[in-house]
Image (spheres, rainbow, N blue to C red):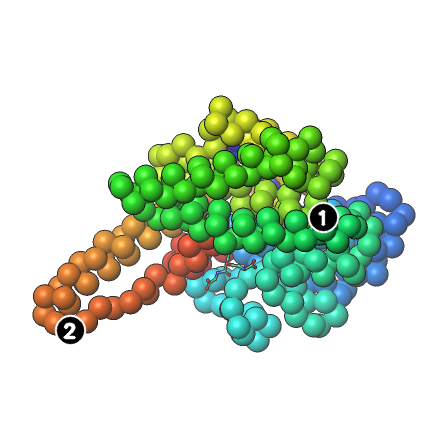
Amino acid sequence: LLRDHGRHEMRSPAQHPLPFHTLSTHCVEMASTESAAQLKLFGMWASSYTHRVQLALKLKGLEFEYVEEDLSNKSPSLLIYNPIHKKVPVLLHGGRPLAESVVILEFIDETWRQNPIMPEDPYERAVVRFWCHFCDDKLAPAVGAVFRSTGEEQKAAVAEVHQNLGLLEGELREGHFKGRRFFCGEAVGLLDIVVGCGSYWLSVFEEVAEVKLVDPVAFPLFHAWLRDFEAQETVREIIPPADRLLEYARGVRQYLLGLATQHATTSASSHNDGSGGSGDHTGADHSTGGTTSDQDSKDS
Ligand SMILES: N[C@@H](CCC(=O)N[C@@H](CS)C(=O)NCC(=O)O)C(=O)O
């Protein structure tokens, strides 16, 4: 799925001197000028949640200052602006912080009305929110479980990913999204951003974890939707190059599997000497594309 990406020069946020390109329409230029000084995004180059916000800002034609975070050594600013979750992305608007990517996306859409990413109709908006929750609460954790496991545990996780992709496929085939190019119509919208920024990890994980997740025969409509999403110019400019994602994912998987082995050994020995378990010290965010590890600091 990411095969084409190498043909385009795509730079990670860390390498990309923001603000982004000159914008073409008058409306977009106005919006950019107005907001460039006001918007600051704290993110991490491989974070699909950060990519969501970058893509929304890009679709709106908004310029912003980008701050790359080292997630293994978070900046005081990040901890001040997101004391609850201590995660990226955080968007500052005129000095006021907002955390949680979907919350940020809705804020962006409500603040800058050009190129809407949410439907007008309240029911349609509610449907978008429902599927955003599905993506973050069911699909992403299942994908994360594939990535950090092996053997039987991994097989069960793959089956769960397939089950969840089957639900999306069903909605595209004969459910709410039937006949639509993107989830809310002809243009990339909020739900496409949420499902799409993250779905490019599926092919990366397929290679790294040696599994098949998006079978084009089993999930033809989801597969076609993902290819269409990834082919969008704005999306191509956001997603880091496949080889960089692959290298990063390999390192993180190795790290997580190493920790799991270490944890199993420690649990077994503490069980034997009666000293009790050690809990989860991975610091890993098990959802798609989100981890805190030494690898992060190496790459960011
Ligand atoms: N629900 C959050 C998830 C954000 C998230 O998981 N961010 C990861 C990077 S992809 C992070 O900052 N992890 C740091 C940590 O877990 O300590 C959102 O939608 O913004």
- What residue lies at 43% left-to-right and 45% top-to-bottom? 143
Residue 35, image quadrant: bottom right
Q: Position of residue 115 (x, y in %)?
A: 80, 47
Tag count: 2
Kind of residue indicated by mark 2? Ser
| Name of the residue lying farthest toward the right | 26
Residue 73 occupies which quadrant of the picture? Answer: bottom left
Q: Quadrant of residue 276?
A: bottom left
Asked whether the viewer can see residue 125, the reply is yes
Q: Around disc 1, counting alpha carbons within 10 Å, would you say few (fewer than 14), some (14 to 19), or many (20 or more)?
A: some
Residue 299 visible in the current orientation: no
Is residue 29 shown above or below 156? below
Where's residue 122, x and y in %?
75, 53
Q: Between tags 2 and 1, which lies in front?
A: 1
Residue in the image at 72% along x and 61% along y:
107
Element on which disc 1 rests: helix
Q: Which residue is mark 1?
A: 124
Q: Nearer the viewer, residue 76 or 176?
A: 176
Please report the residue visible at 79 percent of the width from the left and 50 percent of the height from the top.
120
Counting residues from the start of the chain, the first of labels 2 and 1 encountered is 1
Q: Which residue is mark 2?
A: 275
In the rendered structure, the answer to whether residue 194 lies left or right of residue 263 reads right
x, y percent for residue 32: 81, 55
